[in-house]
Image: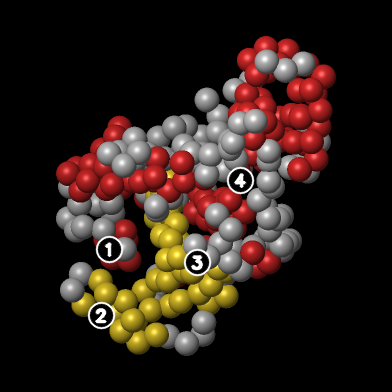
Amino acid sequence: MAVSPEPRERLPVVLSDGVVVLRPPRPDDAADIARGCQDPDIARWTTVPSPYALADAEEFISLRRPDGPEGPGQWWACPTWAITIGDDLWAGTIDLRLADPECAEVGYLVAPWARGRGAATRSLRLACRWGFTALGLRVIQWQAQVGNEASRAVATRLGFRISPQVHRLALASRGERQDGWFGDLLPEDLPDAGGARRRARPLPRLTGREQDVLDLMAAGRSNRHIAEQLGISENTVKNHVRRILEKLQAASRMEAVVSGVQQGLTRLP
């Protein structure tokens, strides 16, 4: 029986809610990143280099791209996505900075030309839900300089509980200390797309063969082709598909594939 690879040995994850797509950063994003990060608000509220040059974008990508010198593990050490909306072009960045196996800090920014379309809220929901289900995080933390109302509004919409206390001179920015806001999010705090709060389900455990079948389903293979490729009967494939649908609580093959992609269990070709 095949053994499913550990998550950090697998390829990076692409997430989507049907509007926003989060994908790993690519070298051809560099020009858009450099242009976006020259925005005065990004320079004011984040710690990106200022002024921001193309070389800064290229360095950022080289440290986070999945095909870097350390392979996919480089991406899994700090899951980072390019935010895209309606096309495959970079419109922002979101990442999960892992403090330990149970805790991560989330960071995000949206390019000026992509604001006002709900991209930050959608991206934050996708990344946090994936962090809770696929990584098993117990808490996700958020922080921002006092005055960054846009970032605070997005975090609040997602259910982050932001402390009313201002943490004085808690954040370092461009050689100076700044007052900070801090918040945290637990799985049960996260609302779904309709605003209802729900507890995130634990990541389903697939057998090695179920994993093989799900990967081939994601590649668009039929039951007959899956049976031929794995050397098993078509009836056996149907049984595996049925169990996959049960474990992912999906009503169809397509829904199972979408759920598997969102939870980091498989990826689209």
Q: Residues within 10 Å of mark 1 (few under 14, many from 20)?
A: few
* Measured Cα–Cα span from mark 4 to mark 2: 38 Å
* Measured Cα–Cα span from mark 4 to mark 1: 30 Å
Q: Which residue is mark 4?
A: 263
Q: Residues within 10 Å of mark 3 (few under 14, many from 20)?
A: many
What kind of residue is marked 4?
Gln
Q: In what element is the residue under mark 4? A: loop
Residue 257, x across and y down, in percent: 66, 33
Q: Which mark is residue 47?
A: 1
Residue appearing at x 71%, y 55% in the figure: 201
Q: Residues within 10 Å of mark 4 (few under 14, many from 20)?
A: many
Does 62 sit above or below residue 163? above
Q: In what element is the residue under mark 3? A: strand
Residue 165, x across and y down, in percent: 47, 87
The tag earlier along the polypeptide, 4 or 3, is 3
Q: Which mark is residue 177?
A: 2
The tag earlier along the polypeptide, 2 or 1, is 1
* Measured Cα–Cα span from mark 4 to mark 3: 17 Å
What kind of residue is marked 1?
Thr
